[in-house]
Image (cartoon, rainbow, N blue to C red):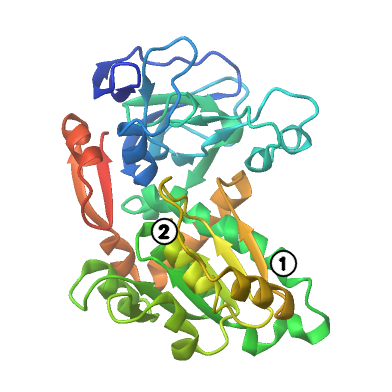
Amino acid sequence: MKALAVFPSARETRLVDHPQPVIQRPTDVKLRILEAGICGTDREIASFEYGMPPADSPYLIIGHEALGEVTELGNEVTGFTPGDLAVLTVRRPCPHERCTPCRHRRQDFCITGDFTERGIKGIHGYMTEFVVDDEQYVVKVPRELRDVAVLVEPLTVAEKAAEQVRVLTQRLPGDLKNDPSNLNAVVLGAGPIGLLGAMKLLRGGFNTWVYSRGDADSPSVKIVTAIGAQFISAAEYQPTDLAKIVGNISLMYEATGVASVFFGALSVLGVNGIFMSTGVPAMGEPIAIDARRIMRNMVLDNHVICGTVNAGRASFEEAVDDLGWFMQSFPEAVRALITSRSTLDDARDSVLTPGGVKSVITIG
């Protein structure tokens, strides 16, 4: 079968003819991949910034956002039938008994770092024609979400962030947990992770602003307006201006991976605020920050700063539910997130050339 792979030693990205996987365990599910999404992680792997092939392979098949159709089942699989649509989780647990998160199927909190991630670290990904995986890593998707279900995996970033916010909000005493003054949220960035995060926040009842570059005619700004959020232009305002526009910012959801935006916005986080970061910046020269102000505010205003990465099965299931709600509430805005589709034959160019909001490879 065809697959898009990176060869780190040769610094090459190209299509390969890879052996088609087969059912080996009674709990295995085989899927024909219909679509695979492209994200910044894929582009960084294809630029050889990171990415690790399996130990027995010179190449890594990339892709960790995928929608598939079930074609074959192991004899102990109970939750699927052929023809079902499904998405696949990304991270697999480490082998160490001492790692309690992995032993409890929360490998997104792995403490050893010896986890594997499909299409990223140590195990092949989904930008190919067929995939086999254990039933516990496969999540069913309603057929009515066929056109947009490839967005489930990026939405899980917001779902896990929301899980963390729910926990962190419990630190507030008494009625403050449900105080309406805690419902001003700012999303930093209008890529897929930011826009899906804004949709999640709106469903949660937050007054939501999205801070990003772009003008009124850009696809991302049109989506912001269509879902009922408010747009703040990064071309007109600095991150340090956000509180002047929004008021007390109770939640910031960072999805830029830009350190200057991170620290500029953090300096104006509101009283009792939570700063949830999802972006991973490229390494480079140190930047100047107002460290004293940030430190003072963090202590005097009861701030919490939290990073989040990957997601467990529960976040995938919640993402499927939320995506259904999004499609009922603002279907055209959800569809508009996918700005290009290309074939697997053209996948290399699509991965190496950023463009639009979300690019998707159509495979099956």
Task: Tell which tag, 1 or 2, sits nearer the viewer.
Answer: 2
Relative to 130, say whether 336 is above or below. below
Q: Residue 243 appears at what percent x and percent y?
A: 50, 85
Frontmost residue, 299 versus 52: 299
Q: Which circle's residue, 1 or 2, is located before the other in the chain? A: 1
- Residue at 33% from the left image edge and 64% from the top image edge: 334
Identity, as a three-letter code, of the amino acid under mark 2: Val
Q: Secondary structure at mark 1?
A: helix
* Left or right: 213 as drawn, with respect to 173: left
* Left or right: 12 as drawn, with respect to 187: left
Q: Is residue 325 visible?
A: no
For label 2, the residue is 258
Q: Secondary structure at mark 2?
A: loop
- Residue at 54% from the left image edge and 13% from the top image edge: 24
The quadrant in which the C terminus is found is top left
Q: Residue 355 appears at what percent x and percent y?
A: 21, 52
For label 1, the residue is 168
- Residue at 54% from the left image edge and 49% from the top image edge: 316
